[in-house]
Image: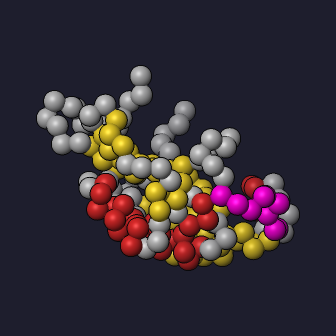
Amino acid sequence: MIEWMDHVGIVVDDLTAATEFFVALGLELRDEAAPVEGRWVDRVVGLDGVRMDIAVVQTPDGHGRLELTKFHTPVSQDGGGPAPANTRGIRHVAFRVDDIHAAVAGLRARGTELVGEVVCFEDAFLLCYVRGPEGIIVELTAQVINPAVPAGPPRIN
């Protein structure tokens, strides 16, 4: 039986840039970049000769974590470019923010752009996608101040 979700792993080429992006967004650095290697990790991930660095960032409440990983070896065999939002697999990570417009403005000041636009969902939530370093899609969501709408995550019916 699952007790809780521990973290989501994201593989990046520039670990420093990815860490700085998520810290600027409001996550807290929990574990500085640290090297990981050895037969045990080879066995866990199913690759030989793994050498990687990992940094962990977490939400201010301490419940949500991202494990940011830079593989030095073996070299990735992927296509390289950012994947569009409809590509199979994990496509985005979502965060609740208190002020979506301020969050977007802060990210734009750092060179981050919206994937689409900020939209209102059922008069209850503002939502948008931004593309972070290395094409990582981050969804931002903020509750519209409306006393008739109960607090909580948006539900798609």
Residue 93 locus on image (x, y percent): 50, 50
Q: Is residue 145 visible?
A: yes
Indicate whether 78 appears above or below 120: below
147 horizontally vs 140: left or right: left
Q: Is residue 79 highlighted in magenta? A: yes
The quarter of the image holding the C terminus is: top left
Of 73 and 31, the residue lying toward us: 73
Residue drawn at the location 82% of the way across and 68% of the way down: 74
45 horizontally vs 95: left or right: right
Prevailing SS of the magenta stretch: loop
Rendering colour mode: secondary structure
Q: Is residue 7 highlighted in magenta? A: no
Residue drawn at the location 66% of the way across and 52% of the way down: 83
Of 30 and 146, the residue lying toward us: 146
Quarter holding residue 103: bottom left
Quarter holding residue 44: bottom right
The residue positioned farthest toward the front in the image shown: 117
The residue positioned farthest toward the top in the image shown: 157
Residue drawn at the location 62% of the way across and 41% of the way down: 86
Indicate whether 151 appears above or below 11: above
Of 3 and 143, the residue lying toward us: 143
Residue 11 locus on image (x, y percent): 65, 62
Residue 5 locus on image (x, y percent): 50, 45
Magenta stretch, residue numbers: 74-82
How many numbered circles are shown? 0
69 horizontally vs 32: left or right: right
